């Protein structure tokens, strides 16, 4: 009788990726396509391909941040970013670094993480489980929203959450659980199955913001390598996104495709079909279909917005300004709140010598009127 082999999961790194087109193999019962890999070389091979590319950008210091929380109470993290912001590449890098199934020292010795003292402490020391959720077999569409979208296939969500909870929560073999995707985790309450995860979203991440997307300095360096497209040209097209900490980051796909083709255009818009909007309407995610029907019929709906909008000039003579939307608030109060935001000083430094405008737009729910005030910061 053949002896059954087993693998101890002690000291395991769990990597969960939603909407990763590279891993579509096995099916999970219930119709949801899920690929699970234990100690595979796929992350290393994927990362090698990225590493060899002409416009490779070193984001390996992200690993230093992760290693600080291994086997601590903070070992559950979820980083969400828009499409084409390097989520899969970072997940491959994490798997390539920690997996005991491969020897990746030759690559990481040449990267920024190799300069960190005792960086080899965690190098290739862990069993790594990669879990990738991809499609729903019944409808055959790209799928990244099962855990992230509200009320899509609600009858199965509890089973799905239970699966992840049993796999991850309070399990002694979990040294680190790293989850990534497009939209934030769905949490039901303080007793949620996944309430152990700390979420780092695009708008509020002050910890990992520089590791997803290309920073301004990185884009300048890539332009210097390219020699055909100037940073000013790229900046005029793609402008960059300002993170919560005030770091300007650029969409990697847009930058790389422009440099490869020596031509700027809207590359990012080609990464997702507009029929995704139709999917949200079809399945009434966040009850959006009901809201659209009400608006089309002339009714009003209430929405909650708790973020500011910053507008940076594409041309040097344009004026930067900050818009804040408020309900039942005085514009004068909103102006003072804008002044207290930490990114205001960052904008002042970036646009030194220019006036920066604050534009609060306040809606009075009783009078149904808007008031706007424009003031110089």
Image (tube, rainbow, N blue to C red):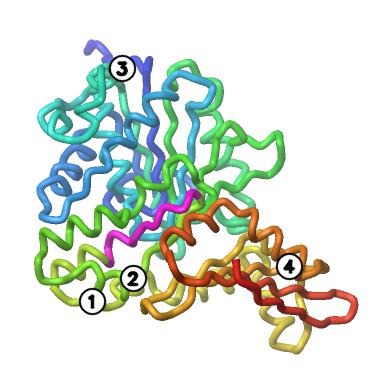
Question: Which of 153/376 is in front?
Answer: 376
* SS of the residue under disc 1: loop
**Neighbour tally class for label 4: few under 14, some 14-19, many 20 plus, Cα within 10 Å:** many
According to the picture, the residue beneath numbered tag 2 turns out to be 238
**Neighbour tally class for label 1: few under 14, some 14-19, many 20 plus, Cα within 10 Å:** some
Number of the front mark, 3 or 1: 1
Label drawn at residue 7: 3
Q: Earlier in the sequence, mark 4 or mark 1?
A: 1
Q: Is residue 77 visible?
A: yes
Find the distance from the CA under tag 4 to the CA under tag 1: 36 Å
At a point 54% along the width and 49% down the height, the residue shown is 204
User: Are the residues tagged 2 and 1 within 8 Å (C-beta)?
Assistant: yes
Q: Earlier in the sequence, mark 3 or mark 2?
A: 3
In the displayed structure, does residue 127 sit left or right of residue 144? left
Location of residue 131 by image quarter: top left
According to the picture, the residue beneath numbered tag 1 turns out to be 264
Number of the front mark, 4 or 3: 4
Location of residue 289 by image quarter: bottom right
Q: Earlier in the sequence, mark 4 or mark 2?
A: 2
At a point 28% along the width and 47% down the height, the residue shown is 89
In the displayed structure, does residue 166 sit left or right of residue 266? right
Look at the image and tell me in which quarter the C terminus lies.
bottom right
Work out whether 319 lies above or below 253.
Answer: below
Find the distance from the CA under tag 3 to the CA under tag 1: 50 Å
User: Are the residues tagged 4 and 3 within 8 Å (C-beta)?
Assistant: no
Q: Earlier in the sequence, mark 3 or mark 1?
A: 3
Q: Which residues are magenta?
A: 245-254
Question: Which of 334/22 is in front?
Answer: 334
At a point 63% along the width and 51% down the height, the residue shown is 155
Location of residue 293 by image quarter: bottom right
């Amino acid at each position: 009788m053949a002896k059954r082999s087993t693998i101890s999961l002690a000291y395991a790194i769990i990597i969960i990726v939603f909407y990763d087109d590279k891993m579509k193999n096995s099916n999970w019962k219930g119709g949801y396509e899920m690929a699970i890999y234990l100690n595979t070389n796929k992350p290393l091979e994927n990362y090698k391909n990225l590493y060899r590319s002409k416009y490779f950008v070193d984001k390996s210091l992200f690993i230093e941040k992760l290693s600080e929380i291994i086997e601590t109470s903070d070992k559950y993290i979820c980083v969400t970013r828009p499409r084409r912001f390097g989520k899969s590449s970072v997940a491959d890098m994490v798997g390539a670094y920690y997996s005991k199934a491969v020897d990746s020292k030759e690559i990481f010795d040449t990267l920024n993480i190799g300069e960190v003292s005792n960086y080899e402490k965690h190098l290739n020391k862990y069993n790594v489980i990669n879990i990738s959720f991809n499609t729903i077999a019944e409808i055959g569409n790209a799928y990244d929203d099962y855990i992230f979208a509200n009320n899509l296939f609600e009858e199965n969500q509890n089973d799905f959450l239970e699966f992840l909870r049993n796999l991850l929560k309070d399990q002694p073999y979990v040294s680190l659980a790293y989850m990534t995707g497009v939209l934030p985790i769905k949490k039901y309450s303080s007793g949620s199955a996944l309430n152990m995860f700390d979420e780092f979203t695009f708008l509020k991440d002050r910890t990992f913001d520089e590791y997803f997307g290309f920073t301004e300095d990185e884009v300048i360096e890539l332009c210097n390598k390219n020699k055909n497209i100037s940073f000013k040209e790229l900046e005029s097209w793609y402008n960059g996104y300002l993170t919560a900490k005030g770091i300007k980051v650029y969409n990697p796909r847009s930058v790389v495709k422009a440099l490869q083709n020596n031509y700027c255009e809207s590359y990012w818009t080609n990464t997702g079909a507009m029929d995704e909007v139709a999917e949200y309407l079809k399945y009434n995610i966040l009850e959006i279909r009901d809201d659209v029907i009400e608006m089309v019929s002339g009714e009003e709906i209430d929405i909650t917005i708790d973020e500011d909008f910053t507008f940076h000039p594409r041309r040097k003579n344009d004026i930067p300004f900050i818009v804040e939307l408020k309900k039942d608030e005085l514009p004068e109060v909103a102006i003072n709140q804008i002044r207290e935001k930490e990114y205001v000083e960052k904008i002042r430094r970036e646009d030194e010598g220019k006036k920066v405008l604050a534009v609060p737009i306040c809606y009075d729910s009783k009078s149904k009127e808007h008031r706007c005030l424009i003031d110089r910061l």
